[in-house]
Each structure stands twice: as structure tokens, then as C-alpha cells.
Image (cartoon, grey):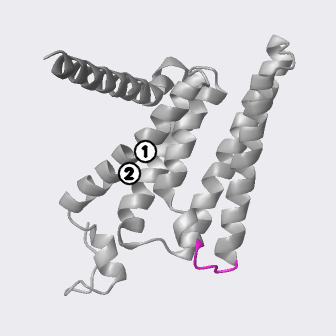
Amino acid sequence: MALLSSIWSVIVSIFSYLWWLFLIWLGVFIAPFYSFDLLWITIPVWLSWFFADYFQEKKGTSFGNAVSNGIIPIWVGIDWTRFLVNSILDEGLGFSWLLSIKFFLCALALVYGVTVVYLAVKAKSYVKYVGRIREVTYVLLVVTPVIYGVTKLSWTWFTAVLLYFPVFYFGIELLFNFLPNPRVIEEDEGGSSSGKFKF
């Protein structure tokens, strides 16, 4: 009986911890509503993701899509850098390891975006995997609140965003499987019997 009680206690503790991480993960997506600057950069990322993922990448990522997808982290990386530099100038922010990490993340976003654009222009086949809009969007959405100081950079944050990435990815995949193919995809594939574009 004592053994069963111990096992049950461990199971409850594990699920409580996973639930706590899940709430932290959800908080990352709610964070933009606490800052106008954050919302300003997040809305275009969400919109770019939806239209690219549903209307273009539902059947796979083309080289053209990858080029567009690479531009997004470049733009966001520039905005992250702008925000940090303004914070230093306006608030007299001094050197810290956290600030260094944030600037490193800015550089990483810029380098990643430039790399994706370069690989897509060079028509490297693996860019269709490393330049998918859904993965790009996820990274930008979870890191942006950290850059803006709305979400604290911690191992807990890192664990939550890593652990629940499959929920984001396959949740969207499941949703898109239930939604009909956009008519624009049918037109691109020549599947429309009328030969005319319909809204």
C-alpha cells in the first residue's frame, strides 16, 4: 500500500510539473498583450505564418517560400536589436550577461535569416526543411518576449518551449488537415475544372 501511495505521489508530481510548464508555455504566447512594442512585432509574425503555412506550405515549402521565410527573422532580428539599443540609450542599460545573450540571439536570428535566403537562392534542397515558416515562427514567437523583457530567460522557459514545441507543430498540422485545401493551391496545381480563379 505504501509503495502504491509513493508511485501515485510521483505520478501526481510529474503531471503537476508538466502542467506548470504548460502554463508557462501558454504565458509566452500571451506575453505580447502586455507590451505594445511586443505586440507590434508579433502580429506581423503571426500573420506571415498563417498565410504562408496555410496558403503556400500546406503542400510543401518551395524555394520562393523559403526566401520569404528567411526575410522574417532578418526583420525581427533588426527590430530586436533596435529595441535593445534604444533600451541602452534611453534607460542607460549597462553591460550584463543577460544583455549579451540577448544581443547574441539577435545576431543568431539575423544570421539564420540570411543563411536561409542564401540557401534558397542557391536552390539547396535542404532549405525546404530548415526554412519552413512554422519552425521559424515558433522560435521568433517564444524568443521575442525574452528580448523585450516580458518573459524571463531561464531553464524553465527553455524546457517549456522545447517540451511543448510538438504541441504547437502537430496541433497546427491537425487543424490544417481538417481544413479544406485553399483554392489557390488547387489553381496552382491546375486542379480547378473551371480554369478560373474563385474566391
* Figure quadrant of the C terminus: bottom left
Question: Could you classify mark 2 by the number of other residues whose Cα lies within 10 Å: few (under 14), some (14-19), or many (20 or more)?
Answer: few
How far from the left and from the top, in percent, is residue 39? 52, 29
Q: Residue at x 38, y 51 (%)?
A: 169
Q: Residue at x 31, y 57 (%)?
A: 173
- Bounds of the magenta segment: 122-126
Q: Nearer the viewer, residue 98 or 61?
A: 98
* Residue denoted by label 1: 165
SS under mark 1: helix
Q: Residue at x 28, y 67 (%)?
A: 182
Q: Nearer the viewer, residue 85 or 162?
A: 162
Q: Chief secondary structure of the magenta span?
A: loop
Alpha carbons under labels 1 and 2: distance apart: 6 Å
Q: Amino acid at mark 2?
A: Tyr
Question: Could you classify mark 1 by the number of other residues whose Cα lies within 10 Å: few (under 14), some (14-19), or many (20 or more)?
Answer: some
Outermost residue on the top side: it is: 91
The reply to whether residue 179 is visible in this rendering is: no
* Figure quadrant of the N terminus: top left
How far from the left and from the top, in percent, is residue 172? 32, 51
Mark drawn on residue 169:
2
Q: Is residue 69 above or below residue 156?
A: below
Are dots 1 and 2 in contact, CB under 8 Å?
yes
How far from the left and from the top, in percent, is residue 195? 26, 86
Q: Residue at x 71, y 40 (%)?
A: 105
Q: Amino acid at mark 1?
A: Phe
